[in-house]
Image: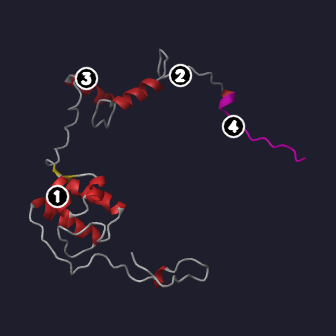
Amino acid sequence: MVVLDAISLTPVGKLDRRALPAPVFADDSAEYRAPGTPPEHTLAGLFADLLGRDRVGVDDSFFALGGDSISALQLVARARSAGLAFSARDVFDHKTIAGLAAVAAVTPEIAAPIEPFALVTWPEAEIQRWQQQRPGLIDVRPLSPLQHGMYFHTAPRSPRPSKLPLPVSAASMCWSSRRTPAS
């Protein structure tokens, strides 16, 4: 927090951001403790990259260095890509590299992509029939429980699904413009 004697305003009465002093984050002269473990090295690199710092010690607070809630979410995503798993809540609870390294779970490497049609248990002849009927078909995957429920509640209940049981006439499908006389 920075205390100002006066706040400069623009001619229209808004805060003059250009007149504000540059923010001062954590004191670089504080005692620096280098990362020691692989998770600490990974997190130190992520902190430095996200916050634009040259070096970050394991006891430096993410928020004192200039982090905020949005950059905390970015930290979580980048850490997950680097093989460390923790939540945004963990960033707020354990603000330092040492704290996050202690609660972070090391995740396995990202699995190889799923081969096409590997998630369906159809005979090969059925897959080939679908590919012939639908040019450009890349893969078929089973519905998730949510998708299954949505399909169940929205699927037409007609014996011929392509023919919806709705009263449709040519007159109801036409759009017309009518002019009403001015009163």
Extreme top residue here? 159
Judge by depth and name the residue closer to the eye, 93 or 111. Answer: 93
Q: Looking at the image, can residue 5 be seen?
A: yes
Q: Which mark is residue 126?
A: 3
Q: Which residue is mark 1?
A: 101
Q: Which mark is residue 175?
A: 4
Identity of the residue drawn at 32% across and 63% down: 71
Magenta span has 100? no
Give whichever of discs 4 and 1 has the lower sequence position.
1
**Magenta span dominant secondary structure:** loop
Residue 162 picture location, percent across and down: 48, 23
Write down the region rendered in magenta.
Answer: 171-183
Q: Are marks 4 and 3 in contact (CB under 8 Å)?
A: no
Q: Which residue is mark 2?
A: 164
Callout in the foreground (2, 1): 1
Give whichever of discs 2 and 4 has the lower sequence position.
2
Mark 4: few, some, or many residues within 10 Å (few <14, many ≥20)?
Answer: few
Q: Are marks 3 and 2 in contact (CB under 8 Å)?
A: no
Question: What kind of element bears circle 4?
Answer: loop
